[in-house]
Amino acid sequence: MTAAHLKGSFNCIRHACGIMREQRWGRITNTTSPARLGLVCNSGYSTAKAGIVGLSKGVALDIGSYGITCNAYAPVAATRMTLSEAHRARLVREYDSGAITEESYRRRMNPPPPEAIPPLLVYLCTDEAADINGQVFGVRGQEIHIYQERAENSIVKNESFWTVDELVELVPKALFSGRASETL
């Protein structure tokens, strides 16, 4: 999985960057997946797609000063894979086992058409998108969003480092207060 997805993205970028740096302009748009957050029974694919996010953000920092942008998008659309009987059977098993919610099951069983994806990709290649760099977009039908990665809830101890006993007591109360267990 990593050879096809992550290494493939890296090699395309590596070969294109020299030309883009010379012309001091370029647009790189990598394909990741919502599976980058974890996928039942397919950790290799999830790992590769998460790696593409890190690659995109790192490249954006490395080459942004040359007028080159590097972003990623995570499409959700009806494809031969998402409409296959094997994929649908897997979703049923995930739902039946409690691994995914009913809402997630319904959304994943009825993906939007792929025609919704290209307008965002074309936009990211325009001069109007020159200041958009190092972002990860989600695209699902009429919905486009930016994934934000930021720290949520924190606990701070000033006197010394945390002990395991203190963490056993505080993590569920302070870090996960008001949040449901998050399993995809």
Image: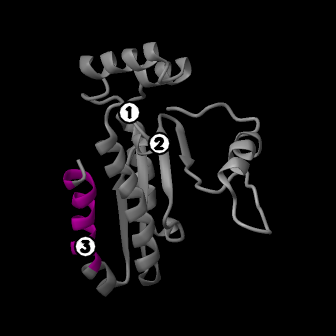
What crowding class fits label 2: few (fewer than 14 Cα within 10 Å), some (14-19), or many (20 or more)? many
Foreground of the two, 144 or 148:
148
Q: Which residue is mark 1?
A: 77
Residue placed at 41% from the left, 83% from the top?
Answer: 66
Main secondary structure type of the part rendered in magenta: helix
Foreground of the two, 70 or 155:
155
In the rendered structure, which disc, 2 or 3, sits on the residue that comes first in sequence? 3
Q: Is residue 129 left or right of residue 164?
A: left
Q: Is residue 178 above or below residue 29?
A: above
Residue placed at 31% from the left, 16% from the top?
Answer: 89
Give the residues drawn in magenta, as a range: 3-17
What crowding class fits label 3: few (fewer than 14 Cα within 10 Å), some (14-19), or many (20 or more)? few
Q: Which residue is mark 3?
A: 14
In the rendered structure, which disc, 3 or 1, sits on the residue that comes first in sequence? 3
Disc 3 from disc 1: Cα separation: 28 Å
Q: Amino acid at mark 2?
A: Val
Q: Nearer the viewer, mark 2 or mark 3?
A: 3
Q: Position of residue 53 (x, y in %)?
A: 42, 57
Q: Which residue is mark 2?
A: 139
Splitting the image into 4 quarters, where does residue 156 fall? bottom right
Circles 2, 1 touching at the beta carbon (< 8 Å): yes
Secondary structure of the residue carrying tag 1 is loop
Disc 2 from disc 3: Cα separation: 26 Å
